[in-house]
Amino acid sequence: MERRDLEIFLILAEELHFGRTAERLHVSTAMVSQTIKSIERRIGVPLFERTSRRVALTPVGRRLEEDVRPAFLQIEEGIARAVAAGRGVTGTLRVGFVGTAIGQFVIGVADRFSARHPECEVRIIENRYADGTSQLHADEIDLLLAGAPSLEDDLAESPVLFRESPVLAVSARHPFARRESVAMADLTRDQVLMPRSLSQEVDELVVPPLEGLRRGPSFSTIQEMLALIGAGKGVFPVPAHAVHYDSRPDVAYVPIRDGQPFAWRLIWRATAESARIRAFVQAAEDAVKDDPSPLIP
C-alpha cells in the first residue's frame, strides 16, 4: 500500500466526509473515492459505511485505523526530522580526529562553527590511528580529519585544508637521531612499525612499498607507536607537528627530505552529506584562510 493511499484513508477516517478529505489533500473527491475502493478491494472487506447522509468506519476500518495511524505518524515524523537535518544546521555533528594537535585544530573549527550555528552541537571524538575510516562506516562519527585521501568510492572529501612535511620518528638512541635529515630509502635500514588493521593501500600512503623494507611490531594508537619507537623497536613517518605536540625524551624526529607531505582534509560518507557537514567544511576552510599553518605553534 502506497504512503499516499494510507494518508487518504487516515484523513477520511478523521473527517468522515469525502469532500472535506479531498480539500485537505488538494485532490478530487473522485480520487479519494477511487483510492478507498482500491484499498477495500485489496483487503477484501468494506472499511467505510456510506449512505447519503453519513460516512462511518466499519469495525474492520476502525481496527485498521487504530493499527496503522501510530506507525504512519512515526514514519511522517521520521521523514520530517530527516528533511530538517538535511536542510538545516541543527542536531548533532560528530567529528573524529587522531592525535593531540589535530584535536586542537578540530576544536578550533568547532568553536567557529558553533558561533555561526549555535543550534547544532559538535561532539569531538578521538580515533585510534589504526581505526582508519572504520568509525565513519560504523556511523560512529560524521566527519574525520585525515592526512591522506580516502581511496574509497563511498566516501567524499573536502579540498585539502593544509599540508605538513613528514618527519621520521626514531629512538633518541638511534643513529638517525644525529642526522639533519633522512631519505625515504633510509627506512629500509630499520624496521618500520605496522599500523594494526589498516589496509595495505592505506598503509602505503604513508609507508611506500620500498624494496627491502622490513616491517616491525604493530600498533593501534599514537601512544603505542611512540612507546615502541622509544624502546628501539622500529621507526615510523609522522607529520611534522609531532615535533611540538608529541615530544618525548626517548623519541627524536628527523625531517624526511623527499617524503610525501601529509595533506589534511575532511572525509565523510557520501550518502550522509548534510547541511551540517557542509557548514563544518566551510568553517574549516575559513579557519585555514586565517591561519594557513594551523599546527605550527
Image: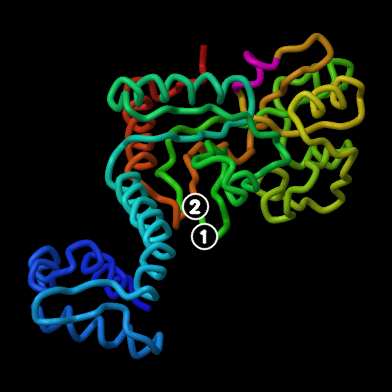
Q: At 74% across and 28% down in the image, what residue appears? A: 222
Res 188 quadrant in image: top right
Residue 297 lies left or right of residue 10; in this view the side is right
Q: At 43% across and 34% down in the image, what residue appears? A: 92
Q: Residues within 10 Å of mark 1 (few under 14, many from 20)?
A: few
Q: What span is colored magenta in the figure?
A: 241-246
Against 40, is 126 above or below?
above
Against 193, is 59 above or below?
below
Res 240 quadrant in image: top right
Q: Is residue 244 magenta?
A: yes
Q: Residues within 10 Å of mark 2 (few under 14, many from 20)?
A: many
Q: Sequence-wise, which precedes: disc 2 or disc 1?
A: 1
User: x%, y% of residue 10?
Assistant: 28, 66
Label 2 residue SS: strand
Label 1 residue SS: loop
Name the chief secondary structure element in magenta: helix
Q: At 74% across and 55% down in the image, what residue appears? A: 200
Q: Nearer the viewer, residue 97 or 264?
A: 97
Q: Are marks 2 and 1 in contact (CB under 8 Å)?
A: yes
Q: At 39% across and 35% down in the image, what residue appears? A: 91
Q: Which residue lies under the disc numbered 2?
A: 269
How far apart, in angstroms, are the residues tagged by discs 2 and 1? 6 Å
Residue 25 lies left or right of residue 112; in this view the side is left
User: x%, y% of residue 24?
Assistant: 12, 63
Residue 129 lies left or right of residue 186; in this view the side is left
Return the mark for residue 154: 1
